[in-house]
Image: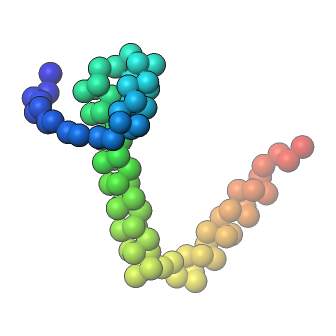
Amino acid sequence: MAETKKIAISIPNDLAKKVESLRKISGESRSAFISRAIGRMLRERELKAQITRYQEGYRKHPESKEEIAFAEASSARILAEEPWE
């Protein structure tokens, strides 16, 4: 089991009620439910950061006209081979 750290937090009552309701449905402890929620939020934040880095890289180094032409020709060739019936 991973090492854990106990953290005391305060949250608004309406949020606490929603957490309690959802965690009962999931069958998780409060700690497990909140840990999973925090983990998901952190993964989503990292994914957004990766997407931003990808977009910035693409803006700095977009495809050349030759690369675009090659991709279009390849796609057309592949699609022409598909049985469309």
**Residue sitting nearer the eye, 71 or 48:** 48
Residue at x 44% of width, y 74% of height: 58
Figure quadrant of residue 77: bottom right
Q: Quick one: which residue is furthest to the top in this view?
A: 27
Viewport quadrant of the C terminus: top right
The answer to whether one can see residue 26 in this image is no
Lateral position of residue 67 relative to residue 12, left or right = right
Specify the color scheme.
Answer: rainbow
Residue 66 percent location from the top left of the image: 57, 81
Residue at x 15% of width, y 36% of height: 8
Figure quadrant of residue 1: top left
**Residue sitting nearer the eye, 69 or 29:** 29
Q: Looking at the picture, does residue 41 appear above or below residue 32?
A: below
Residue 35 percent location from the top left of the image: 27, 33
Residue 24 percent location from the top left of the image: 40, 18
What number of labels is visible? 0
Residue at x 40% of width, y 30% of height: 17
Residue at x 43% of width, y 24% of height: 21
Lateral position of residue 17 relative to residue 77, left or right = left
Q: Quick one: which residue is furthest to the right in this view?
A: 85
Residue 56 percent location from the top left of the image: 39, 75
Q: Looking at the picture, does residue 58 appear above or below residue 51?
A: below
